[in-house]
Image (cartoon, rainbow, N blue to C red):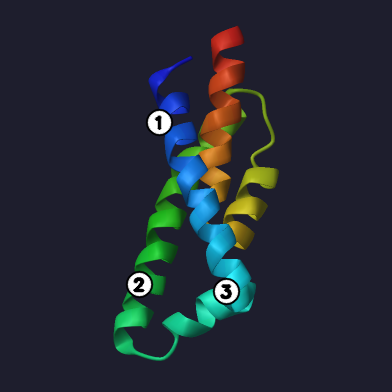
Amino acid sequence: MNNHRTLAIIILIPFTLLTAYAVMEVGYIGIFDYQLHSPAGWQVITDLVIALLLVLLWLIPDARRRGRSPWPWVILTLAAGSFGPLLYLVFAGKSAEAA
């Protein structure tokens, strides 16, 4: 198992638990709604969008280089944030090891 895949799995497990807890407490929309009530929240959302766009600038060409369609990962990233890139690292790492 490569280091990127291992790190992605280590991050993914507690992040999934935290996300599940947040969604259970406030709902999917509630996570975003909370951030929209102050300039500090706007900054957090803007930072997240910028960071994920930068990640997608890496992910799309990397997926194509590996012969995979990037669009499922792009859609997952747009819908679920960091889950897209984290799961891409988990599954892309697996196919890279086989190559």
Q: Is residue 80 left or right of residue 3?
A: right
Residue at image coords 32%, 76%: 43
| Dot in front, 2 or 1 | 1
Residue corresponding to mark 3: 25
Q: Position of residue 53 (x, y in %)?
A: 45, 56
Q: Position of residue 37 (x, y in %)?
A: 41, 91
Badge 2 local density, few (<14 within 10 Å), some, or many (20+)?
Answer: few
Closer to the camera in the image, 31 or 71: 31
Q: Position of residue 41 (x, y in %)?
A: 36, 80
Residue corresponding to mark 2: 44
User: Mark 2 vs mark 3: which is more N-terminal?
Assistant: 3
Residue at image coords 49%, 48%: 56
User: Mark 1 vs mark 3: which is more N-terminal?
Assistant: 1
Distance (Cα) linking label 1 and label 3: 27 Å
Check contact, mark 2 vs mark 1: CB within 8 A. Answer: no
Q: Dot 3: what SS?
A: helix
Q: Is residue 99 visible?
A: no
**Three-letter amino acid code of the residue under disc 3:** Glu
The C terminus - image quarter:
top right
Check contact, mark 2 vs mark 3: CB within 8 A. Answer: no
**Three-letter amino acid code of the residue under disc 1:** Leu
Closer to the camera in the image, 51 or 38: 38
Q: Is residue 76 visible?
A: yes
Check contact, mark 1 vs mark 3: CB within 8 A. Answer: no
User: Mark 2 vs mark 1: which is more N-terminal?
Assistant: 1
Badge 1 local density, few (<14 within 10 Å), some, or many (20+)?
Answer: few
Badge 3 local density, few (<14 within 10 Å), some, or many (20+)?
Answer: few
What is the number of the mark on residue 7? 1
